[in-house]
Image (cartoon, rainbow, N blue to C red):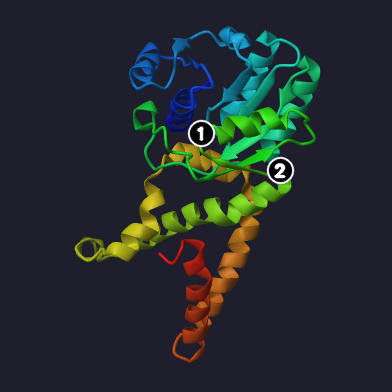
């Protein structure tokens, strides 16, 4: 349900694995036509009730719409249906879905594939998007986790089990904070009166450091707001480290701090 970058890429990857048939549900006929043409679905529907035909249902819509979607979806599903999502925030999703899943006897296992792009829409779908990437699975005690783990493994992803609070804490540092910092860099650039002059001097470091600021603003506002508590905690830590670097300017301590971060970062990305 939802045929954007993630939903479309998942459909392509599942079909490529030869282990699944994919029914795609979207609001627009044009989206379904694009998804079919790009090999993301076997067939499409604009009717939410058709999800009842599936063995596994994936809600691949933006964060703010997952719980409202579940409210519409769950009454159509057979008791015992298995549902997952792809949201990059898990706490608020599980809090919202827990009573709904209990009411309608739905098995829900949360998912978050750590893969993506600043591009959006099914036309940006890539069957190899998840290959080699981590996919967090938040079972919350659900015994049907193995079916969701198998689904993500079939895409080439490496699933890993985490609790919702730990996931949201990790995501705040490794994903949500970098996006926020990228936007802060752009705003810093834009605030200078000599902005036109600066535009002719932007180099690779500014480009690389702000790349994710080109991501969908609506989507990322939803994600950041949904994980506001953990994101604020990460900002406090980041601000402390930025002050420490600022205080070291002009003395030998700066080089020590830069050497420390250099040493920590290189192994994270195989020395690149």
Mark whose residue sits in front, 2 or 1: 1
Is 90 situated above or below 109?
A: below
* Residue 97 coordinates in the image, percent (x, y): 72, 27
* Residue 206 coordinates in the image, percent (x, y): 33, 62
Q: Quadrant of the C terminus?
A: bottom left
* Residue 73 coordinates in the image, percent (x, y): 64, 15
In the visual, does 48 lie left or right of 40? right
Residue 151 sits in which quadrant? top right
In the visual, does 261 lie left or right of 193? right
- Tell me the tag on residue 29: none
Q: Residue at x 40, y 61 (%)?
A: 185
Looking at the image, can residue 86 be seen? no
Disc 2 to disc 1, C-alpha distance: 23 Å
Is 119 situated above or below 103?
A: below
Give the class, few, some or many, for how many residues have Cα within 10 Å of label 2's Cα (few <14, many ≥20): many
Q: Residue at x 53, y 78 (%)?
A: 260
Q: Nearer the viewer, residue 110 or 72?
A: 110
Q: Nearer the viewer, residue 72 or 81?
A: 81
Q: Nearer the viewer, residue 41 or 193?
A: 41
Q: Residue at x 54, y 51 (%)?
A: 176
* Residue 196 coordinates in the image, percent (x, y): 21, 61
Per the image, the residue denoted by label 2 is 164
Looking at the image, can residue 166 be seen? yes
Whichever of labels 2 and 1 marks the residue nearer the N terminus, that label is 1
Callout 2 touching callout 1 (CB < 8 Å): no
Dot 2: element: helix
Give the class, few, some or many, for how many residues have Cα within 10 Å of label 1's Cα (few <14, many ≥20): many
Q: Nearer the viewer, residue 159 or 177?
A: 159
Residue farthest toward the bottom in the current orientation of the protein:
252
Per the image, the residue denoted by label 1 is 155
Dot 1: element: loop
């Amino acid at each position: 349900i939802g045929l954007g970058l993630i939903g479309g890429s998942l459909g392509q990857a599942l079909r490529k694995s030869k282990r699944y048939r994919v029914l795609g549900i979207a609001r627009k006929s044009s989206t379904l036509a694009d998804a079919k043409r790009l090999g993301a679905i076997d067939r499409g529907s604009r009717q939410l009730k058709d999800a009842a035909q599936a063995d596994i249902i994936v809600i691949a819509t933006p964060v703010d719409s997952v719980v409202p979607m579940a409210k519409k979806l769950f009454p159509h599903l057979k008791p015992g249906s298995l549902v997952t999502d792809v949201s990059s925030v898990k706490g608020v999703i599980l809090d919202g879905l827990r009573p709904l899943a209990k009411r309608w006897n739905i098995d829900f296992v949360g998912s978050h594939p750590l893969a993506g792009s600043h591009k959006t829409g099914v036309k940006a779908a890539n069957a190899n998007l998840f290959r080699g990437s981590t996919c967090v699975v938040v079972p919350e005690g659900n015994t049907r986790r193995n079916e969701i783990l198998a689904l993500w493994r079939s895409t080439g992803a490496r699933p890993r089990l985490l609790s919702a609070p730990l996931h949201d804490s990790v995501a705040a540092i490794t994903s949500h904070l970098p996006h926020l910092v990228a936007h802060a860099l752009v705003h810093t650039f834009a605030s200078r009166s000599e902005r036109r002059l600066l535009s002719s001097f932007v180099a690779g470091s500014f480009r690389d450091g702000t790349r994710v600021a080109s991501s969908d603003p609506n989507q990322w506002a939803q994600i950041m707001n949904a994980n506001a508590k953990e994101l604020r905690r990460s900002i406090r830590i980041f601000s402390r480290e930025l002050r420490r670097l600022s205080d070291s300017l002009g003395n030998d301590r700066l080089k020590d701090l830069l050497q420390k971060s250099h040493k920590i970062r290189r192994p994270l990305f195989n020395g690149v």
